[in-house]
Image: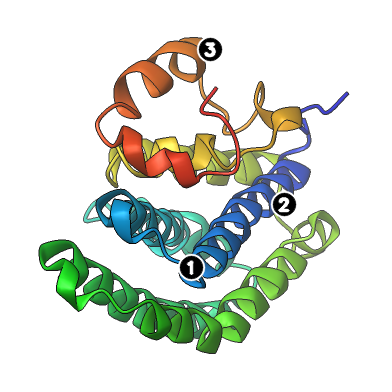
Amino acid sequence: MTTVPTDPFEYIHWNMKLAHKTFEEGYNVIVSKLDDPPTNDLKNFLGYCEAWAHAISHHHDTEVYTDTLQEATLFPALNTKMDFSHEKEQHAAVHAFLDDFLATVQAAQADTSKFDAAKLKGMLESSNDAIFTHFREEVEHIEPEKLKAAGFSEAEGRQMIADVDKHAKSHGDPFLAVPYMRSHTPPEYKEIWPPIPWILRKLVVPYMLAKKHSGYWKYSPYGMS
């Protein structure tokens, strides 16, 4: 049975891998649909594309963001004993793509005559290496033994988890990010990831948060709960 790691360093690594997997799933859905786009349902399909890009941006914010109170999230904390400058550079490249992708999607949302499936697919495929190389290298960099070797204590690891969780809950669009993550979580992880209370998993997300953009999630690979 799949369980949540109790070691904080294993948890950080496990959580990152699962988050990245949801983005890979969304990428594959969008690319496959662009070969024969649902032109009779563009509002929902473009909304799904927007949700995918928003979910990655929100995830990256929980890694690099530092607010005015200097409450650092993941990378600023890791940078105290490791060098995450490479990941920061990768984030810049990924976000340059996300900004262009979102602008193109939002232009088509405002005027469907501007929808260009070939252009969107080209944008995605040209950024494939930057996105997935970053995901792979980031997961390798935060392997539990590497965090321990850098000298982080378990207390520091747990603080990183708490800070990321706090930021994730207080930023981003919950009507996009949360339903996206839930509907891209495979069945074997539904009860334990993302780590949210039962009432959110079973009631709030499927019957409240997901309802606002219910048409988007028909393109998701898994159910909402």
The residue lying furthest to the left in this view is 110
Image x and y of residue 11, in percent: 71, 41
For the residue labelled by badge 3, is the local secondary structure a helix, a strand or a loop? helix
Dots 1, 3 in contact, CB < 8 A: no
Q: Is residue 192 above or below residue 148?
A: above
The residue to which callout 3 is attached is 198
Which of the image's four quarters has the N terminus?
top right
| Residue depicted at 44% across the width and 17% down the height | 200
User: Disc 1 versus disc 3: distance between alpha carbons?
Assistant: 38 Å
Task: Check disc 3: other Cα within 10 Å, few if <14, some if 14-19, many if 20+.
Answer: few
Q: Which mark is residue 36?
A: 1
Q: Is residue 194 visible?
A: yes
Image x and y of residue 121, in percent: 46, 79
Earlier residue among tags 3 and 2: 2
| Residue depicted at 71% across the width and 64% down the height | 139
Q: Is residue 185 above or below residue 34?
A: above
Tell us which disc is closer to us: 3 or 2.
3
Which of the image's four quarters has the C terminus?
top right
For the residue labelled by badge 1, is the local secondary structure a helix, a strand or a loop? loop
Tell us which disc is closer to us: 1 or 2.
1
Lateral position of residue 45 relative to residue 86, left or right: left
Identify which amino acid the numbered label 3 is placed on: Trp
